[in-house]
Image (cartoon, rainbow, N blue to C red):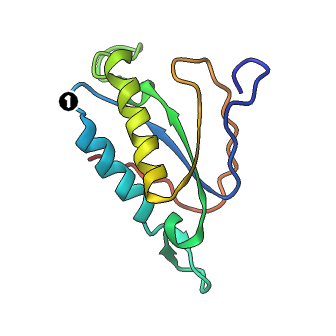
Amino acid sequence: MVGDDEVGRIGAGLCVLVGVTHGDDAADADKLASKLWGLRILDDADGVMNDSISDVGGEILVVSQFTLYGDTGKGRRPGWSAAARPGHAEPLIERLVSALRDLGALVATGAFRADMEVALVNDGPCTVILEV
């Protein structure tokens, strides 16, 4: 939600929080899309994490999240210097979404640079950090 507006919603699938840093580029966005599309972290018919979003026809919610690059190494206030500036990050988020859609994914998004309320039902034991 952004204010009173619902900007993105998915059913069963992946909620992907994406942080962009200064060295990230279009090739990284494409690689991440491919990885997300084929990542075998969903249960198959036997209850084994053996299926991917591409296997089950699940959906993906992509939410830009610069705070993933918060540095808490010093003091008690995170520093954000590792997070890419909006002019660099937004086109890469858009590239990721486009690449996922090109692969066949059903993708919803948050709103870039908006104060969002994201609701998530975590159905399963898997949270993964992907770095490309």
On screen, 124 above or below 99?
below
Residue 86, horizontal then vertical, whole percent: 38, 17
Say which residue appears at 42% left-offset and 64% top-offset.
39
Residue 82, horizontal then vertical, whole percent: 28, 22
Residue located beneath label 1 in the image: 23
Say which residue appears at 34% left-offset and 13% top-offset.
75
Say which residue appears at 41% left-offset and 31% top-offset.
68
Say which residue appears at 58% left-offset and 71% top-offset.
56
> Is residue 17 found left or right of 56 in the rendered image?
left
Judging from the image, what secondary structure is the residue with disc 1 in?
loop
Q: What is the residue that sits farthest to the bottom in this orientation?
A: 46
Quadrant assignment for the N terminus: top right
On screen, 53 above or below 71?
below
> Is residue 98 found left or right of 130 in the rendered image?
right
Q: What is the residue that sits farthest to the right in this orientation?
A: 4
On screen, 56 above or below 120?
below
Residue 67, horizontal then vertical, whole percent: 44, 25
